[in-house]
């Protein structure tokens, strides 16, 4: 018995010695690891197309750093910094990493990231990273802070030789808000937008518990208070935009707070606006000035209106009549993003109501379907407090407005500079 035991142990020991030259049992893995070569090829697709996307001007994504990682389970095996290069024909961005004589068992994972963290190395993991980290700012504008990520398992090419092919993709969309809210000057003297914010967005990547629902007292990092100058600057779509980067699959919801000076109008006992029929055939609300004088408007003229027991009577023209106004403010939420053909028409609402990574959503505040008929009519769809009310005190998380959006791919299209925060 003793002899048999010794022989068996000896065989086991000799086997271990034979393996020790070039094999290693993986920690927590049943696979045998051998010194192997690995080639990793990856690309960022620069030629995606779809019907609503406009062709652009070949502006490139921005890569501060790109790193390839090899992981065995949760343990990092090795990493390598690489460079992404643009293919002159396909417009794809491609990269390659080669590793020689590293211990692999064939069950490893390869991860490629770009722009994750500062310095020369892009960190391997993006779960839990804050939305603040990917926003444009004064020092890092446009797309410079967007994370790119891709992963793959290994494919065996031959003895102790593996490869991995990875599609690198951005994890966020860019939302650009610009334009001038069109209003009906029969009811509104002047209007400005003083707050713009996305709603119900993910605060930390891949963390469903981090959804941000901004309120005025607790509004989150993407809430932007616009000065008068900033609102003026975004009226021209080629000058400035309100720019936010949002993680993919966030819902398409943008709130704005409108501040308006609305004319004080004569109303009936039930608060219905009174419309006066003038002798020239035109119709007008009845305005009131600070002296409590009443007037209806005919073209550019104000016609005196007097009130008597029988109702209202038309008088002569009043020169220098200035209707009184009252300040109103409230939030309006744009939730139905749609495209139109030409200057107006039926809105084709984007299908799933969520942002898709790698695209720019350009929201035009001057093209809002204020009538609510899923049709944008240029020159007719205008903010009107009589029909649209004065908004809500806090951002509303329900269906509200439809807005015209242009969708563009940022690997091909230029990016308008955002307002510096």
Image: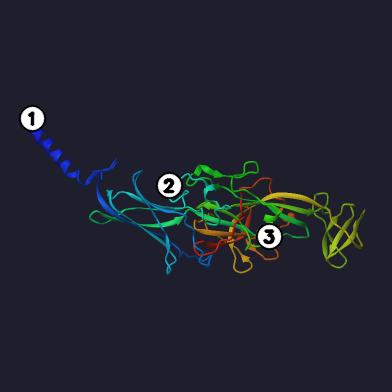
Q: Is residue 383 visible in the rendered structure shown here?
A: yes
Quadrant of image for the N terminus = top left
Q: Which residue: 72% across, 59% down?
A: 183
The alpha-carbon separation of the residues under discs 1 and 3 comes to: 94 Å
What residue does disc 3 label? 180
Identify whether 233 is placed above or below 219: below
Badge 1 crowding class, 10 Å Cα cut-off, few under 14, some 14 to 19, many 20 or more, is: few
Reading the chain from its start, which is encountered first: label 2 or label 1? 1
Residue 2 x/y as whole percent = 8, 30
Asked if residue 366 lies left or right of residue 210, the reply is right
Along the viewing direction, whichever of 108 and 346 lies nearer the viewer: 108
- Label 2 and label 3: CA atoms lie apart by 40 Å
Q: Quadrant of residue 74?
A: top left
User: Which residue bears the numbered disc 2?
Assistant: 125
Helix or strand or loop: what does disc 2 sit on? loop
Marks 2 and 1 in Cβ contact (< 8 Å): no
Give the residue pinned by disc 1.
2
Which residue is painted at 43% across and 47% down in the image?
Answer: 125
Within 10 Å of the Cα at label 2, are there few (<14), some (14-19), or many (20+) other Cα atoms? few
- Position of 208 with respect to 328 (left or right) is left
The residue nearer to you, when weighing 22 against 104, is 22
Residue 175 shows which numbered tag?
Answer: none
Residue 324, image x, y percentages: 83, 53
Q: Nearer the viewer, mark 2 or mark 3?
A: 2
- Tell me where residue 149 appears, x and y as whole percent: 43, 53
User: Disc 2 versus disc 1: distance between alpha carbons?
Assistant: 54 Å
The residue closer to the viewer here, 46 or 14, is 14
Local crowd at mark 3 within 10 Å, few (<14), some, or many (≥20)? some
């Amino acid at each position: 018995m003793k002899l048999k035991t010794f022989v068996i142990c000896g065989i086991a020991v000799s086997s271990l010695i034979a393996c020790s030259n070039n094999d290693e049992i993986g920690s927590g893995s049943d696979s045998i690891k051998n010194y192997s070569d690995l080639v990793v090829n990856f690309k960022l697709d620069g030629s995606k197309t779809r019907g609503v996307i406009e062709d652009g001007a070949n502006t490139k994504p921005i890569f501060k750093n790109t790193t390839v990682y090899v992981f065995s389970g949760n343990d990092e095996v090795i990493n390598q910094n690489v460079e992404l290069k643009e293919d002159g024909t396909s417009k794809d961005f491609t990269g390659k990493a080669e590793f020689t004589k590293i211990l692999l068992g064939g069950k490893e994972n390869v991860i490629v990231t770009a722009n994750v963290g500062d310095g020369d190395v892009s960190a391997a993991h993006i779960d839990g990273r804050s939305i603040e980290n990917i926003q444009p700012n004064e020092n890092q504008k446009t797309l410079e802070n967007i994370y790119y990520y891709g992963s793959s398992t290994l494919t065996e090419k031959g003895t102790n030789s593996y490869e991995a092919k990875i599609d690198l993709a951005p994890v966020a969309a860019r939302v650009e808000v610009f334009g001038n809210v069109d209003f009906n000057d029969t009811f509104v003297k002047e209007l400005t937008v003083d707050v713009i914010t996305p709603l119900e967005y993910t605060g930390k990547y891949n963390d469903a518990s981090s959804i941000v629902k901004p309120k005025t007292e607790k509004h989150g990092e993407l809430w932007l208070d616009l000065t008068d100058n900033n609102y003026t600057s975004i009226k021209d779509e080629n000058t400035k935009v309100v720019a936010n980067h949002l993680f993919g699959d966030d819902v398409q919801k943008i709130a704005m707070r409108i501040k308006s000076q609305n004319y004080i109008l004569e109303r009936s006992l039930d608060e219905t606006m009174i419309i006066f029929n003038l002798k020239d055939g035109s119709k007008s609300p009845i305005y009131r000035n600070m002296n409590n004088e009443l007037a209806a408007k005919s073209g550019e003229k104000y016609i005196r209106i007097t009130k008597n027991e029988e109702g209202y009577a038309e008088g002569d023209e009043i020169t220098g009549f200035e209707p009184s106004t009252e300040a109103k403010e409230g939030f309006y939420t744009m939730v139905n993003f749609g495209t139109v053909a030409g200057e107006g028409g039926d809105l084709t609402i984007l299908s799933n109501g969520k942002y898709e990574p790698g695209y720019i959503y350009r929201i035009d505040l001057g093209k809002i379907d204020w009538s609510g008929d899923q049709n944008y009519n240029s020159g007719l769809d205008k903010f009107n407090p009589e029909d649209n009310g004065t908004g809500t005190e806090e951002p509303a998380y329900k269906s509200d407005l439809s807005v015209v959006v242009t969708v563009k791919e940022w690997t091909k299209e230029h990016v308008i500079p955002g307002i510096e925060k």
